[in-house]
Image: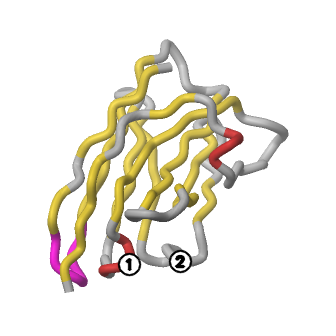
Amino acid sequence: VQLQASGGGLVQAGGSLRLSCAASARTLSTYSMAWFRQAPGKERDFVAAVRWNAGITGYADSVKGRFTISRDNAKNTVYLQMNGLKPEDTGDYYCAATWAVGDSYIGRSKEEYFYWGQGTLVTVSS
């Protein structure tokens, strides 16, 4: 699976951005897709994930109620709609994919994901 992320940019606090991640796979029905972010000098942290087939989602506590992950089956693309952005949301955002496990499990650690796209930089100014 090859992943291509896009949509990053500079936005003021309180603004919105939508990130996209296009996947080059025949089918994503057996995968989970996720977004992680990495601030300068910090670890890569989980942001959100979706099980492609069931549409089950999971979010980091820091983004719940502000970010929404979704997928478009026809386009093999996963999106991250980010509203109410804060300066602490600044960082490189990476999309990732892994094989779905169990019925509803959502992986939240980067070690569980085997396919990664390049980062797209999000900068939120105060």
Q: Are marks 2 and 1 in contact (CB under 8 Å)?
A: yes
Residue 72, given in percent of the width and then of the height, sits at 40, 37
Foreground of the two, 46 or 74: 46
Where is mark 1, residue-wise?
88
Where is mark 2, residue-wise?
62
Magenta part, dominant SS: loop
Disc 1 marks a residue whose amino acid type is Glu
Secondary structure type for disc 2: loop
Q: Residue at x 45, y 57 (%)?
A: 37
Q: Split into 4 quadrants, where in the image is the C terminus?
A: bottom left
Disc 2 marks a residue whose amino acid type is Ser
Secondary structure type for disc 1: helix
Q: Is residue 80 left or right of residue 100?
A: left
Residue 13 within the segment the image draws in magenta = yes
Q: Residue at x 33, y 31 (%)?
A: 4
Q: Which residues are magenta?
A: 11-16
Q: Residue at x 43, y 21 (%)?
A: 2
